[in-house]
Image (spheres, helix red, strand yellow):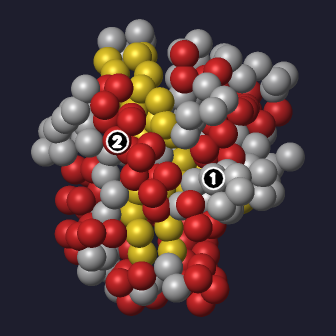
Amino acid sequence: MSAIEVHPDPQQLARAAAGHIARIAAEAIAARGRFTIGLPGGSTPRLLFTLLSNLPWVRRIDWEHVHVFWGDERCVPPDHPDSNYRLAHEMLLRNVPVPAEQIHRIHGELSPAEAARTYEQTLRTFFPEDTPTDPQPRFDLLLLGLGDDGHTASLFPGTPALTETTRWVAENYVPRLDSWRVTLTAPAINAAAQVIFLVSGAAKAEAVQAVLQGPLRPSAYPAQLIQPRAGQALWLVDQAAAALL
Ligand code: 6PG
């Protein structure tokens, strides 16, 4: 079961997302002195990043105590137009005082396998103290997008990374895009304390309905793999994306 919030339009959706992020960040920093967030790629987060970069939101998050990660990355250099890191850097990270050493990007300039191995090592080094007996990448919050084909992160329909059960990070060739990606695996995403899907636009309506209300077919709709161990995912959608619910 997932929790769903429907907001009238993309602007109000972004404001709602900013509110959830600020709340979760404050709780995490109060409890553990830090807030670990995984960002999505794609275009949907643009409005949110702009909001978070400006008043009032830029003052509502204690950026000095934020650690930034990504749910996935394209296998391109960090200055490439397709880079998820570049998008976040240009629209958010260069506008807020997150210390550089607290920005943990996926090194898309490496080979896919090396980028995946390096990022997994980064996560295993960063998260061991959370659960020493059963280490898990327990992000305070993972923000995810949804593709119109039901993918999330870079877990695309029918691709090998969908069946990964032990690695936290996998390289994943996506035939539909004829390109390599690096992605958190479903077990890694499901280890997060909170997962929020941010979905906007009519083009996503069929995928939202299929993922949330259709039969369980995770190979066809990989977002169905996301069932966080700590509790239900929150779906933040605008009315256009929720039209078929
Ligand atoms: C990526 C993302 C991917 C994205 C969806 C939605 O690297 O592209 O992580 O999972 O969130 O494809 O993308 P849009 O927001 O552009 O529709």
Say whether residue 133 is left or right of residue 140: right
Q: Residues within 10 Å of mark 2 (few under 14, many from 20)?
A: some
Q: Are marks 1 and 2 in contact (CB under 8 Å)?
A: no
**Pick the front one: 234 or 164:** 164
Q: Nearer the viewer, residue 60 or 184?
A: 184
Residue at horizontal 78%, vertical 51%? Answer: 229
Above or below — where is 71 with respect to 143? above
Q: What residue is shown with label 1?
A: 136
Furthest-left residue in view?
Answer: 79
In the picture as drawn, the residue positioned furthest to the front comes out as 133
Find residue 131 and report its image quarter: bottom right
Residue under circle 2?
Answer: 118
Tag on residue 108? none
Q: Quadrant of residue 211?
A: top right
Callout 1: helix, strand or loop? loop
Pick whichever of labels 1 and 2 is earlier in the sequence: 2
Judging from the image, what secondary structure is the residue with disc 2 in? helix
Residue at left offset 32%, top offset 18%:
179
Q: Is residue 120 visible?
A: yes
Mark 2 residue type: Thr
213 versus 200 height, above or below: above
Q: For the residue with label 1, is its CB less than 8 Å from the closest atom of ligand 1?
A: no
**In the rendered image, is residue 234 in sight?**
no
- Relative to 37, is 68 on the left or the right? left
Amino acid residing under circle 1: Gln
